[in-house]
Image (spheres, rainbow, N blue to C red):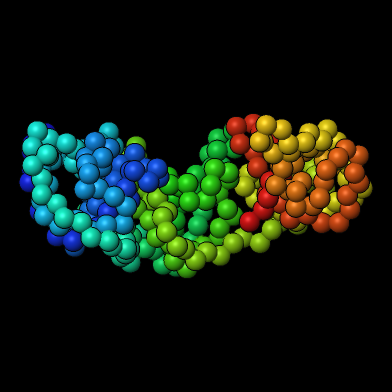
Amino acid sequence: EAGKEVKLSLANAVVNVWSGSGQSMASYVEDATGAIKFDMGLSNMEFMNDSIALNGYVFAQYGKDSNGIPQLSVSDNTGDSQVETTASVPASKVITLAEATSESALSRYVKFENVDFVKKVVDDWGTTECSLVNGTDTIVFFDQFYIFGYGSMPDFKSFNSVQGIISMYDGKYEFYPLGEYSANYTPAVVVENIAAAKAVESGTNVNLTLKDAKITAYLPSKYGGSATAFIEDESGAIQISGDVLSAVGVESNNMILNGNMYVKYVNEWGTVQLSAGD
């Protein structure tokens, strides 16, 4: 019952994610029977840390977060908890996508095997939504822990295996990747000029043919940021990110480029550019 204080017995309950690591606002703790979230207040207790096993018991208040996910928070008697800790390596459990979309799977650290990856644009701003799919079973794939950085999602085709936490947002089950994975990538799309590169979906890897393409408006790195520039051919022009400029050795205006360049077309919130490909 929400709001009720509980005394939770802990028997080798592993902290799969700890909020103190900076990856999450909450912690995810799992034993042989299931998993539950510890909110930030409970996560800040002195016995909490990353990659440990908890034994003993903890007093906490049971409730649910704004998305209906069961969680524990600090109660009046949390200070009387008795918890011993030992080092432990989080270990995921292999389940199917069908098994993942149930309340019993929430907050668990799981592994999916042989699943397809689907990415689609959902609005005019180039926002993408990603999913894992196996037949008719599917779950939203969201990089909550920034495993893949702050840019566009890599152009995955499928996963041989992928680990992560099961969660829920706005009534939909979600999967937050975490840990090692084995992926297959969609081959780069061959495009003959800049205009063709700008016609693909955001997040697509392209093999761009450069024919007398000229670097214009080169802006060197400043105040710790990265350089940027625009590249233009007969078909059009587009911005290039600093990581691409470094990779191809661009350091000034008016350079002429010929050949091929493997990059990713990105259109995020109206900003269009070529960034480093996968």
Asked if residue 73 can be seen in this view, the reply is yes
- What residue sits 66% from the left and 61% below the top? 187
Q: In the rendered view, would you say 89 is above or below 59? A: below
Instruction: Tell me residue 168's x, y (percent).
Output: 32, 44
Q: Is residue 60 left or right of residue 167?
A: left
The front one of 111 and 88 is 88
Instruction: Tell me residue 189's x, y (percent).
Output: 71, 56
- What residue sits 91% from the left and 46% below the top? 256
Number of numbered discs: 0
- What residue sits 48% from the left and 61% below the top? 116
Quarter of the C terminus within the rendering: bottom right
The front one of 70 and 131 is 70
The front one of 126 and 149 is 149
Asked if residue 100 can be seen in this view, the reply is no
Q: Is residue 94 left or right of residue 118?
A: left
Tell me which corner region of the image, top left, top right, bottom left or bottom right, holds residue 185.
Answer: bottom right
Quarter of the N terminus within the rendering: top left
Instruction: Tell me residue 142's x, y (percent).
Output: 44, 47
Q: In the rendered view, would you say 241 is above or below 118? A: above
Tell me which corner region of the image, top left, top right, bottom left or bottom right, holds residue 10.
Answer: bottom left
Q: Is residue 176 left or right of residue 158?
A: left
- What residue sits 64% from the left and 31% below the top? 270
Instruction: Tell me residue 176's x, y (percent).
Output: 40, 50
